[in-house]
Amino acid sequence: MKGKETLQSWLQESEDIVFFGGAGVSTESGIPDFRSVDGLYHQQYRYPPETILSHTFFVKKPEEFFEFYRSKMLCLDAKPNRAHVRLAELEKEGRLKAVITQNIDGLHQKAGSKTVYELHGSIHRNYCMQCGKFYPAEWVAQSKGVPRCSCGGIVKPDVVLYEEGLSEETLRASVNAIRRADLLIVGGTSLSVYPAAGLIDYYPGKRLVLINKSPTPRDASADLLVQGSIGEALA
């Protein structure tokens, strides 16, 4: 396909590539996204996932929050797919300067990527809300009910819930990377969740690539549209 040929050409020519990805990057690893037909938002739960994954719900119904979190968000057996691997290779070659991700699964790092800006945090970082002690994701997965620290405090995953703000430091680093990029690849995101979706407005270049299986609100502003699998397009 012509779009993929153009993308391969741009990947070879560019020296300051930034990749900005969402849940669609990890679906090939078996992790469900949120908004597609088979996504979490289209499945039936006692409460809507948007409600469960909110700060208010976490505070008011922590047991039900962790029940959902363990079963749907803690995908510890997932392996990096060809998209994660190719991006890590591009970084190793010196052409990819940063990965900006809305995902919390840590698969970019597992594949070997070093410069990863996690807009929504990570399941692999968990801290006691009382004393700040760190706990790994495996500990949270094996805990029962509401996970509690040895001091008695609740151990909260370092993930950004609805109603919580994104890290200013992570946002600033992401904006700086995008401003310097000579090629910005956006993949696997609906570009409907702000402020993350607004990051592409900081890109001043002429090589904005959107890779997605379905249309996004920003398709008209792309210099190149590639419809389909991110892993296939990058590989």
Image: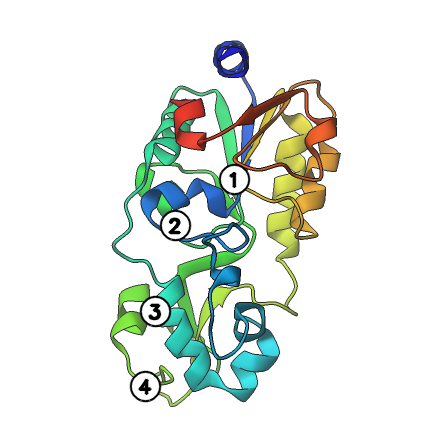
Residue 65 as seen in the image, left or right of residue 50: left
* Structural distance between the alpha carbons of marks 3 and 4: 24 Å
Task: Identify which residue, 93 or 50, lies in the foreground.
Answer: 50
Crowd around label 3: few <14 · some 14–19 · many ≥20 (10 Å): few
Labels in figure, total: 4
In the rendered structure, which amino acid carries the disc numbered 1?
Gly
In the rendered structure, which amino acid carries the disc numbered 3?
Ser
Tell me the mark number nearer the camera, choosing from 2 and 4: 2
* Structural distance between the alpha carbons of marks 3 and 2: 17 Å
* Structural distance between the alpha carbons of marks 4 and 1: 39 Å
Q: Is residue 142 visible?
A: yes
Name the mark on residue 188: 1
For label 2, the residue is: 106
Label 2 element class: loop
* Structural distance between the alpha carbons of marks 2 and 4: 26 Å
Marks 3 and 4 close (CB-CB < 8 Å): no
Residue at figure coordinates x 47%, y 70% from the top left: 44
For label 4, the residue is: 150
Task: Identify which residue, 109 or 36, lies in the foreground.
Answer: 36
Residue at figure coordinates x 68%, y 31% from the top left: 219
- Residue 156, image x, y percentages: 45, 74
- Relative to residue 11, is residue 133 depicted above or below? below
Tell me the mark number nearer the camera, choosing from 3 and 4: 3
Mark 2 or mark 4: name the one nearer the start of the chain.
Answer: 2
Mark 1 or mark 3: name the one nearer the start of the chain.
Answer: 3
- Relative to residue 167, is residue 184 depicted above or below? above
Name the mark on residue 71: 3
Residue at figure coordinates x 63%, y 68% from the top left: 164
Mark 3 or mark 4: name the one nearer the start of the chain.
Answer: 3
Crowd around label 1: few <14 · some 14–19 · many ≥20 (10 Å): many
